[in-house]
Amino acid sequence: MLLSERRLGPKLYGVFAGGRLEEYIPSRNMTFPEFKDPVFGKAIARKFAVIHRLDVPINKHPNWLLDTLDLWAQTAIDYHTDPNNSLNIQNPKLETDLYAFDYKSELKWLRQLLTTCGSPPVFSHNDLSETNVLIPDDSTAYADGIVFIDFEWAHYNYRGFDIANYFTKFMFDFSTPEYPRVRCDHNAYPNDYEKRVFIREYIKHSKGLTCDKQTEDQMVKEADYFALSAHLLWALWCLNKCHSSGVQTFGFNTLERLSGYVHNKDYLMATAQLYAIPYTQFAALVTKRLFH
């Protein structure tokens, strides 16, 4: 209702038992190249700045991210250790490789890392991708000519997650028609200059939002730290989808997200000189590029 009132999403016409009635917006989805384009990126930064300033009457404690990571990791592990279950992807080696990653230890280390980051809690979209951005036929109907949709994942969360999640999506092109219908390019993660172009625009349009933590350096740090949480969140989401759907592409998507986690963690270790726990055998597999 609040997003409708602020013209940040489709108009809400009414709610009823089991559903709601929303505006239909003549539009198209943003394409993957547009999603990465700096011009559209500035529009996304401005939209994030507005959404993050909202005062939404829900629980404002940013516990959703870490609680969800813990829950999904335990669900996946419990399913895997149940002798009556399997990943249902008809690829035992892939299943073995996916569980070579020590989710519990990595999450323990990540929780400690994120608490040192100083990222403030804000109302967050949490699931922005090119398919969740509409470009209306009438470019004047909405500010910046774009509309965010699909706020089902929206919660109060650490500011760094929305920005990091956006940056990590640059690495995964789901528009490719070839199996497994995703192309991963680790080098597509934005470089320092590209991050700062986006962050400068965000800061310019988020005046008064945690000014004491509103510097470029601080927000670059938040993005790089929370990129790890974005990779793990969607890796675990895909892994649990393997269990429930049996669709093999979710297994490959899990693998690519875990590879992205390793790649981004190595980058963070090199640039921030942080102490890291071993990745167990998973990192060695990635390093040898046995997955490609």
Image: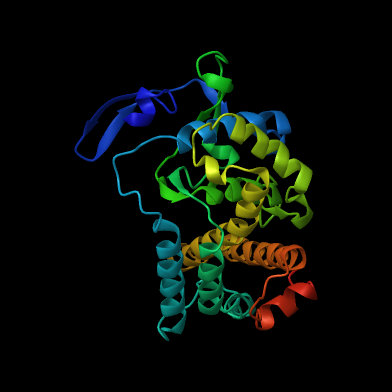
Residue 268 in sight = yes
**Residue nearer the viewer, 259 or 111:** 111
Instruction: Find residue 92 and report its image quarter.
Output: bottom right
- Seen at 47% across and 38% down, the residue is 52
- Seen at 72% across and 64% down, the residue is 272
Quadrant of the image containing the N terminus: top left
- Seen at 49% across and 31% down, the residue is 50
**Residue nearer the viewer, 264 or 133:** 264
| 17 relative position to 8: left or right | left
Quadrant of the image containing the C terminus: bottom right
Q: Picture coordinates of residue 66 (x, y %)?
A: 45, 63
> Height in image: 8 above or below 97?
above
| 116 relative position to 57: left or right | right
Instruction: Find residue 75 and report its image quarter.
Output: bottom left
| 34 relative position to 222: left or right | right
Query: What is the basis of the colouring in this image?
Result: rainbow
Instruction: Find residue 105 and report its image quarter.
Output: bottom right
Q: Picture coordinates of residue 69 (x, y %)?
A: 46, 65
Q: How many numbered callouts? A: 0
Residue at the far bottom: name it.
83
Residue 149 in sight = no
Residue at the far front: name it.
212
- Seen at 50% across and 20% down, the residue is 26
Q: Picture coordinates of residue 59 (x, y %)?
A: 31, 49
Q: Picture coordinates of residue 65 (x, y %)?
A: 45, 58
